[in-house]
Image (cartoon, grey):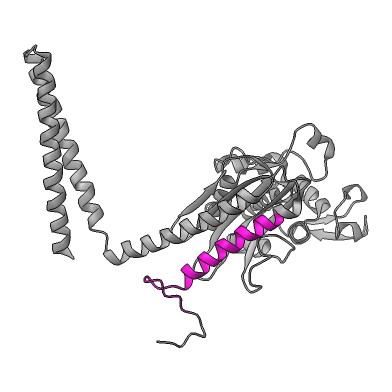
Amino acid sequence: MLISCHIRFATYWFRLTRIADLAIQLHRLYLALRGDGSLMQDSYEKGNVMFIRVICVSLVAVCASAQTVPQAQQDRNDKQFVLWQKLASRINDIDRNLDGVLGVAILDLTDGHTFLLHADDVFAQASSIKITVLAELYRQAQESGAGKAKLTDLYTVQNSDLVPDSDIMGGLTPGVTRVTNRDLATMMVAVSDNSATNVLIDRVGMPNVNALMASLGLMHTLLRRKMMDIQAANQGRENVSTPREMMILLDDIYHGKVLNKDMTEDFFKMLSTHKESFLPRLLPDSVRIANKPGELEGVRNDSGIVFATNRPYVICAMTGYLKNERDGEAAISGISLAAYEMFDRLGRASEYGRVVSPNNSKP
C-alpha cells in the first residue's frame, strides 16, 4: 500500500511539474509579446513563476494526502455514496409526483452526511413547532433557577385554557384537576393537545423560546402565535421553520449542545412517546422514533430522529400548497421508508457491504 502511494505521488508530481513548466513558458511568451522588458516586469515575472510553483506544490501535497486514505475506507465511502445517490433519486421521484411543495433534510448522526432538498425554504410548522416549546421547557428545567419552569411545577386547569383539538385537557375538570409541566408536555407530544401547549407557552414564555432558537443560529425558526389563534395566523403571524434549521435543532440537542446528558435522554424519551404520525407509518414497530408531526390545511410535516440500529439519523420533511393532504402524508412516509431502508442496511453492514441479520447463519 505504501509503495503504491509513493508511485501515485511520483506520478502526480511529474504531471504537475510538466503543467507548471508549460504555464511558466506561456507566461514568459506573454511578457515577450508585450516587449517592454523592464526590471519591474522581470520582478513581476519572477513573482508569478514562484506563485505558480507554490500552487503546484500545494496541489501535489493535497493529492498525496488524498492518496494516503486507506483503500478499504475509500471503497466503503464509495459504496455508501452510491446508496446516498439512490436515496436521492427515490426522494426526487416522490417530489416530482407530489402536487405541492416539498422540503427535506436528512442527517446521518454517525458521519455527518446530509441530503437536502429545498432545505432553506420556510414552511408553516403546524404542531411540529412544539419541538421548540419542549426544548425550552427542558432548558429551563435544567437551570432550575428562580422564575424558571420545572417539570414538576403544578398547574390547575382553567376553563379559559381550552381551545379546539385538546383531547385530554378538554376532558379534565377546570378548577379542580392539577397537572405538572411534564404532564402538559406529554399531552402536547402524544396527542398534540393544543390547550396543554398554550399553557406551556405561557409558562416558559414565547420570547424565551425564540431566544433559544436565535442562540442556536436558527433565525427562521419562530414561534409567533399560540395554537388555534386564527386571528394571528390571518395577520401573517405563522409558526415557521425550515427543514435545515429543524434538522440542526435536533442535531444540537442530540449532541448535548442544548441540554446536559440526563436532560437530553429525557427529552428524547418524551419526544419518543407513541403518536399517530407520518415518519413511522411504514417502518417496523420496533424502531424508536422521537418526532413531532404537524397538520394544517395544505400542510403536512414531520421532524424527528429515527434511532436505527447503529445508525441514528435526523429526518425533517415539510410540505406546503398541497392539493391533497393525504398525498403529502404519503410522500413523507415514502421518504421516511426510503431513508430507513438505507440507514438500516448501513447500520448492519460490514465495510464490504455484507448485511448481517440476527437470524443469518450462512458463512
Q: Position of residue 300 (x, y in %)?
A: 71, 50
Left or right relative to 42: residue 205: right
Residue 267 appears anywhere in the view: no
Region in magenta: 329-356
Left or right relative to 297: residue 264: left
The image quarter in which residue 71 lies: bottom left
Q: Position of residue 191 (x, y in %)?
A: 78, 60
Residue 353 within the magenta-colored segment of the rendering: yes
Residue 294 within the magenta-colored segment of the rendering: no
Task: Say which residue appears at 83% left-offset and 41% top-offset.
Answer: 229
Q: Position of residue 152 (x, y in %)?
A: 74, 60
Using the image as rendered, state which of residue 222 and residue 236 is in the foreground: 236
How many marks the image carries: the answer is 0
Task: Say which residue appears at 63% left-offset and 68% top-offset.
Answer: 283
Task: Say which residue appears at 58% left-offset and 56% top-offset.
Answer: 315
Q: Is residue 30 above or below residue 76?
A: above
Residue 312 appears anywhere in the view: yes
SS majority, magenta: helix
- Quadrant location of the C terminus in the rendered image: bottom left
Q: Position of residue 59 (x, y in %)?
A: 21, 43
Using the image as rendered, state which of residue 199 and residue 85 is in the foreground: 85
Q: Is residue 85 above or below residue 296?
A: below
Using the image as rendered, state which of residue 11 and residue 188 is in the foreground: 11
Task: Say which residue appears at 69% left-offset and 39% top-offset.
Answer: 207
- Quadrant location of the N terminus in the rendered image: bottom left
